[in-house]
Image (spheres, helix red, strand yellow):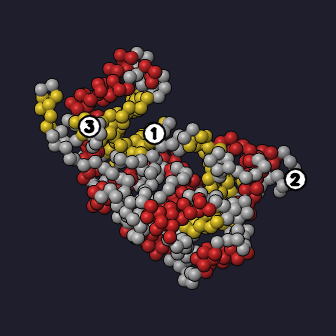
Amino acid sequence: MASGLTFFVTTGRGTETFAVEEISEKLNCPVIKKRDGKVFFMVPFCEQMKEQLFALKSVERIFVAITDYTNKNFIQDKRTFLNKFIQELSDKDNFTSAQKVIEVLETLSSEKYSTCHQNSESHACLPKNCCKKKNDPATLANCAEQPQSTLAKEMPPLKKARLVSCAQEKNNINTDLLEALDSHSQDLTGDTNKIKEVSRLCCESTNAVPHLETTSLVDTNNYQVDGKIIKSFKTFRISIKCSGKVKRWLDIKRLSKNLVWPITKATRWKANLHHPDFEICIHISDEFVTAGIPLTKFPLSKRDYKVDSGLRSTIAWIMSHLANIQSGDIVLDPMCGKATVLIEANSEYKTSLYLGSDCDTNQITIARQNVSSCSDSISTVSLVLADGLDMPYRDSCIDVVICDAPFNQNHKIHADNIEQFYLKFLKEICRVLVPNGRCVLLVLHEMKEKLINQLISGPARLQISKFDSAYFVPLIYVESHPVKLGETQACILVLNK
């Protein structure tokens, strides 16, 4: 067996760096190269390889690499391009490597994965009293009837006291939160290992990752091509995506048909357009040609533990990663929407406590359904109906604030102008944060400079000799990361108090 197996992942534009960091940290493997939307790496063979690959949270999909080459030298002439293209996609060595990877992953398939594949309607991440089908109306009804999530994991006494105090000072806070905070009499602050062990056991008890659907060897039909009998154990179809100038003169349908025989000859696989075992995905641009086989039927970014998705899960995970959440931290999302950010943060940092608030009743209802559908979040995420511009929390009681701030597009901002809205919002965040507290915001890219200028460390502040709290917020700019949400240009801002 080869010492390393080559894969590549697709990511959102602007998030490649985070994928590199996560791959290096979780897989402990070298990254070969990265470019717009793709990261290539080689994984050393080990028994935990499959679980390690599927544990990645910052990537969209994982592919077994077939080929990847520079297209600049061939794009000028159509015949030269097609000759090189067919040559690469009919190379037996390229497919032999991919076949070895697939065989290894099938060998490493554990019972907990194969069980969930055999029953596609089973969702072990749902509560036991919920229906099996996630989209069944009865499931949503059961989730809605779940009791308000409580903070089962204990927090240090000082943090508990300050949060209870802040709740008692505000009359409009949800009473369930008070009951949740007052109901804990035991102190587990010194037993962090026990909390981690309970979290691990809770995670293992789900025994399923529903969306990780791998292929099975089911087709053993004999068929003829040009009079030759070929025995096929797998089926495939071809999916080609083009971008750039090459898209103008390339006939994708014709090219797909012409590829079928060379790939069948190289792999002994049979073409099947409707129910293939594998999909060979090819991306052609003016600079590169990349081909690979996805390891899962659905993207890894499609989390099955959420009833209703909000913000893209990969972006939510990256925001929680940038927040540097520590064990025992109190994490707040003051405009939580469907609680996507809190659930993603909780999936990675299980020994912290999470609070979410929103002024929209419908959003809070969906958020509660999402929290109830994820067994890991039921005991650690609590939701409150409250205004993010007038938070029901005492000064200096929150360690971390993470928020997908409204863009004034799908969710309109109720203020005279967007600058005034963000100024008031930043002041409220600063008020509830502890000294040296951390804040991560997702905002429109065009708002980045305007927000930075409203900070005490911003360029506009440096031009004024005296600090004026009416125009500036005592938060310090740390870093920013541009990201793309579909066609929308956004930016992740990291701030400190």
Q: In front: 496, or 224? A: 224
Q: Is residue 159 left or right of residue 149?
A: right
Give neighbour class at mark 1: few <14, some 14-19, many 20+ (Cα, 10 Å): many
Of labels 3 and 2, earlier in sequence is 3
Alpha carbons under labels 3 and 2: distance apart: 71 Å
Mark nearer the N terminus (1 vs 3): 1
**Res 444 quadrant in image:** top right
Depth check, mark 1 against mark 3: the one in front is 3
In the picture, measured across the screen, residue 185 lies left or right of residue 286, that is: right
Residue under the image location 51 percent in, 63 percent down: 369
The residue under the point 62% across, 53% down is: 404
Identify the secondary structure beneath mark 1. Answer: strand
Give the distance between the C-alpha atoms of the residues marked 1 and 2, in whole angstroms: 47 Å
Q: Choose between 2 and 91: the one closer to the eye.
A: 91
For label 2, the residue is 466
Quadrant of residue 39 in the image?
top left
The mark closer to the camera, 3 or 2, is 3
Task: Name the amino acid type tagged 1.
Answer: Lys
Question: Disc 2 residue type?
Answer: Lys
Q: x and y percent of residue 431 in the render?
A: 74, 63
Disc 1 to disc 3, how far (Cα)?
27 Å
- Percent of width and height locating residue 206: 38, 66
The residue at which mark 3 appears reads as 272
Residue indicated by mark 1: 38
Q: Is residue 423 left or right of 59 when viewed as pictured?
A: right
